[in-house]
Image: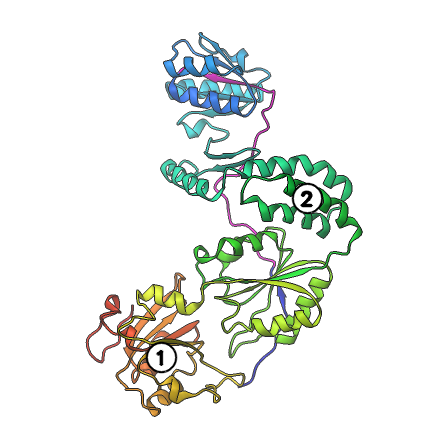
Amino acid sequence: MQVVSRLPNEVTSARIQPLAVLPVFLDLQGKRAIVAGGTDAAAWKAELLAAAGANVQVFAAEVSDEMRRIAARETRIELLERPWKPGDLLDTAVAVADAGDDSEAAAFEAAARRAGATCNIIDKPAYCGFQFGSIVNRSPVVVGISTSGAAPILGQAIRRRIETLLPPALASWAQLARDLRDRVAEGLVPGPRRRALWEALVDRAFGPEPTANDKRDLNEHIAIVPHSSRAGHVTFVGAGPGDAGLMTLKGVRALQAADVILFDDLVSDDVLELARREAKRILVGKRAGRPSCKQHEINAMMVSLAKAGRRVVRLKSGDPMIFGRGGEEIEALEQQGIGYDVVPGVTAALAMAASLGVSLTHRDKARSVRFITGHSKDGGLPKDVDWKAVADPSASTIFYMGGRTATAIADVLIGHGLSPSTTVAVCADLSRKTENKLHCSLAELPTAIGTIGDDHAVMIGVGAVFAKREFAALQRPESQLVNG
């Protein structure tokens, strides 16, 4: 098979998809804000503004018990029991109202606009210059969540999920980062060395509260780094089969820390969306039968970038150490004395088992699991495989990249004694919107591949675990292929 080479390709597509709203954060420390209305909803907005450091005046002819409690407790809130007037909005940074009707809302919005104040009318988005979102508070880290008014309950659910991911100790680490900021600015010029210091802090920030040892180590780091030559580093990250939700947290953190990302063809756009916006993204894909980057070019690029002090992520579909040439690339780094680490990913075989709802090691059906490559360096079926051993009815066998060699796979397994009626599952584009699945016998495999197409990322599962009872969602009449 002829292999056509292509050069690594830097991706220049948009770094961010369209936004319904632009998230911004207002500095209200010591600034004046007003709230018009004495309702419970207005009380919550007054409390938020005061928590952000604003000096809040509340204008209300009628005041709820909740508003009175909050005004009595918060020294930054002044309660004025009268209706608001346009002049009250002068010299105001933020103006919020709980308007009784559209007429009052329009009047308040117009007064705020004339006064140069940012305006919000509670539950009346047509009159709002900004929206309040759900908040995760780890100050000085603050996370705001907006659904653009479409689904506030969803925003609250997202907030709860994020709350579980951000430990309370993160607030202390953020405070420590703020305390170090001036020293870092004075001692480290912008670039890889300064980023290395902040990454050293980030590596600890999702654990326990910072200790005295942590603070001493980071201060020593500032003193040491300017006088040292800090080498680059390569992190191999498993992108999983396609669904960004299957990425590990450690993998996401590596993407967020990268200066350069070298990624394969099968890495999804959703996974790339998790990367740091400033990171350079370079496509170095290798696909059978298609123009591909040569392996030595990829190796040389990794070495060159790391020697230049860059933090490189080598982003591979599935798991980096399963048919991803990770071993060859690691050898190239070791020969040059370049540091690396590996972040595992969900390999396609496990994504296949999850999608089909089968256990690859069902104790009544399989004694072992085998991962076999579907093609060799020359593009055909590998000849240096013990096919007699592979044709084992007590094993679950998964063929990677076997779409173009499916006929040969069926012929060689049947030729070495595996029953033509052995159950086979064929999956394409696992975990993606284009995912497709077929259920057939080993003898029917060539026809199945013709149905599903060999130009997709195809996985072939062979063995008793894929029998109808285990593959209930994809049952079919005898000798009839059915799309999953």
Give the quadrant of residue 446: bottom left
Relative depth, front residue between 359 and 103? 359
- Residue 368, percent from left and from top: 36, 76
Query: Disc number at residue 382?
Result: none
Rendering colour mode: rainbow
Query: Disc number at residue 218?
Result: 2
Quarter holding the C terminus is bottom left
Task: Please report contact status of discs 1 and 2: CB closer than 8 Å, yes or no.
Answer: no
- Real-space Cα distance between discs 1 and 2? 59 Å
Q: Which residue is mark 1?
A: 450
Relative depth, front residue between 409 and 101? 409
Q: Secondary structure at mark 1?
A: helix
| Viewer-side label of 1, 2 | 2
231 drawn magenta: no
- Residue 403, percent from left and from top: 41, 78
The disc, 1 or 2, on the residue closer to the chain's N-terminal end is 2
Q: Can residue 141 be seen from the camera position used here? A: yes
Amino acid type assigned to the residue bearing label 2 in the image: Leu
Amino acid type assigned to the residue bearing label 1 in the image: Gly
Give the side of residue 367 with respect to residue 231, left or right.
left
- Residue 70, percent from left and from top: 44, 16
The magenta-colored residue range is 12-38
Q: Secondary structure at mark 2?
A: helix
Query: Which residue shows up at 47% across the image and 57% down it?
Result: 247
Find the residue positioned furthest to the right: 227
| Mark 1 surroundings within 10 Å by alpha-carbon count, few (fewer than 14), some (14 through 19), many (20 or more) | few
Give the quadrant of residue 148: top left
19 drawn magenta: yes
Q: Main secondary structure of the magenta part?
A: loop
